[in-house]
Image (cartoon, coloured by chain):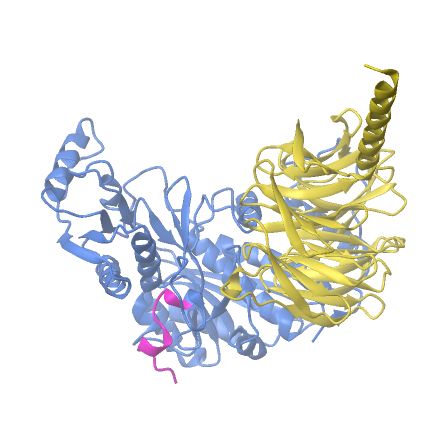
Chain colours: A blue, B yellow
Amino acid sequence: MSLVTAAPRRMPLTPSLSPQAGRGRDARSGRVRGRFLLALLVAVTGMPAAEVYAAGQTVQIGWLSQAVKRTLPLSYLDQPPQDEGVQGARLGIADDNTTGHFTDQSFELDERVAPEDGDIAAAFRDLAAKGTRLVVTDLTAPELLAVASLSEATTATIFDTGASEDRLRGEDCRANLLHLLPSRAMLADALVQYLVAKRWSNLLLVVGHGAGDQEFAGDIRHAAQKFQAHIVQEKPWTFVPGAKRTDTGHFAIQAEVARFTQGISYDVLVVADEDDEFGDDLSYRTFDPRPVAGTQSLVPSAWARPHEQWGATQLQARFLRQAKRWMTDRDYAAWMAVRAIGEAATRSKSTDPAAISAFLRSDHFELAAYKGARLSFRSWDGQLRQPILLADARSLVSVSPQPGFLHQFSELDTLGIDKPETKCRMG
Amino acid sequence: MSNGVTRAWRGIASLACLHFAISIAAADTIYVSNEKDNTITVIDGASLEPVKTIPVGQRPRGIVLSKDEKSLYICASDSDHIEVLDLATDKVVRTLPSGADPEYFALDPTGKLLYVANEDDSLVTIVDIDRGAVVTEIPVGVEPEGMGISPDGKYLVNTSETTNMAHVIDTAKREVVANILVDSRPRRAVWTADGAQFWVSAEIGGTVSVVDADKREIVKRITFAVPGVPTEAIQPVGIAITRDRKLAFVALGPANRVAVVDAQSYEVLRHLLVGQRVWSLAFNPDQSRIYTTNGVSNDISVIDVGSLKVIKSVPVGQSPWGVVSRP
């Protein structure tokens, strides 16, 4: 099966430039070049670029998120960005449109960001009324379920890039949802596989008070059972230090962590603290010298700043240039969502949302996303199967699945909830 | 010592010299770019020993010999230019403009132009070597990578890794004339010597597409299965096809194998175990050997084409990327 497209409309070539004039990578950003090409296109064809593509050849993609006040992380080095997620979607649109030049398809992102107390359902209905059937969302699990249950959403495909709750892939699954971020179960499996491969199989599990922390702890317990690790003890973290960043504040936390971990025999401390309330305070302060992993220190994640393998350097560089900051997990998930739509449009030779959605769920779909594997959606719960990176702030430590964890169909399915154990009943 | 014995010794010595001279003449010199330590390793093809390490620009990746084989062109990706290494003195004597982040390139058959893939900019840049100037730029897909020029120089095939296409560029018109959708993350485009086909590897797709150059249609998708190796680890990159189009060799990346393919029937004949993450391939001048760069084990493997056996591995620098052989 091959697609030979007709030669594209003659594309304006940028005039040759003297080698000295602004050849550096920073001197000419992609956006500047894009505008330049656009300007030329307008100049040459005498019409705005939007009219160059035939109507109906444009794929409308909605973006739906809610402005939320994030809790400040423990470390002031990494403040949560205001434009998290949507920057990834914008980069995906740029990538899709570069490809679209050759297939006469174009892609547009209709961004809707509801205020903190705003009406998400109304924003979704508005997108639906405009005929948008492919919607990328960065929402919490309750908001996502509310949107997915709207009658206007029955013919839509919603790309979840913000929620990692297991229940969205389990008992609360929906046929119109696809999940780009790994579930917490996948993250836990990825971490425990690595710890077991290292033969660091005795775990001290330290759990914060958040609902996400509780779910991640449950997933670590499940992973330990599955991969034969042993949780020697599970302790809730309840200590609320005073002003720990003020002068001499470190004494109290240092003493508390030593006390907290004294008298326990374990190999690795696994921490569940998604809101960054205490997890960064554990390393180097335990009673015995033991590494820390989980939501801090050695972290399983979809994307990581130190990742540069399988061409990831290129995506990191493109994103940095566009957003002027590093790509996060949610940016990456949004980029994957938009790229998946683009890839399905190219392969199915269609801009029809229904055809795109059908192709995404078919056996023919595969996405290359800089992790050295073919990514595709699990038929039983709509989860994107993908390798999980294990990294700390400065280095990529490993990538799971670990060698030796075998699966009859895809080794990527050793991570997370497999078909025989799923609680998802769609339709 | 009698005169007779002296004469006999002289005779033996001159014979030995003659033999030495012949083996030197037949042997090649191998050049390997080391992406992570900014050097070129020089290997003597007769002894298969590294003889020299030459410092070059930052992140050297694609390398190609000049038409007269007196110079080596080097994509110095992080230096954003091409370097010209004089092979008589082993010194970088010139730099050429390349556009940002040159990764890989092709020399046109006249030896006057370089076609450069600018990975960060979605462009193919054409560089006039004598003038040291950019002639023009051609917009292509996201992350252009592979560059294969037809034996007659009329067509250039460029692959774009994220757009998943092989773009056929008419080198006279300097524009894209056809786009062929291939499998995920296409890497190399290599023409057969007769100009009838070009082969495109897809790293994530795990396939090699054989494209009929006239019809611009895929005539065969070659797949690979190595017992005991997960399918995800089979990631084709480098391709080398013998001049008589009897055999093709495909580097399978982290599967650590080079596949040997019957280039007529497209049947995969066997898989040869080489170093880790095998990447680029190059024949020696008489095509009796293939050299492979192994990006993770930091060495090259030497394959004897007649016996289809790996005969040696030679240590090089960090993350070896490109390899060429010079008579």
In this rendered view, identify the residue nearer to me: B256 or A240.
B256
- In the picture, measured across the screen, residue A154 lies left or right of residue B120, that is left
* Main SS class of the magenta portion in the image: loop
Residue A221 lies in the magenta stretch: no
| Residue found 36% across the figure and 37% down from its top | A77
A222 left or right of B282 in image: left
Bounds of the magenta span? A413-427
Considering every residue shown, the one lying at the far bottom of the view is: A427
Residue A261 picture quarter: top left
Q: Nearer the viewer, residue B220 or A141?
A: B220
Report x, y in % for residue A188. Answer: 31, 59
Using residue B3 as the reference point, say whether residue A218 is left or right of it: left
Compared to residue A282, the image places residue A111 above or below, namely: below
Q: Position of residue A130 (x, y in %)?
A: 54, 73
**Above or below: residue A253 compared with residue A153:** above
Q: Nearer the viewer, residue A162 or A258?
A: A258
Write down the quadrant of residue B296 in the picture. Answer: top right
The reply to whether residue A34 is in sight is no
Residue B38 visible to the viewer: yes
- Number of marks: 0
Q: Which one is in front, B251 or A157?
A: B251
Location of the N terminus of chain B by quadrant is: top right
Queried whether the magenta region covers residue A415, the answer comes back as yes
* Most distant residue in the top direction: B1
> Where is residue B172 shown, x and y percent of the image?
90, 53
Q: Position of residue B124 (x, y in %)?
A: 75, 49
Q: Quadrant of the C terminus of chain B?
A: top right
State which quadrant residue B306 falls in.
Answer: bottom right
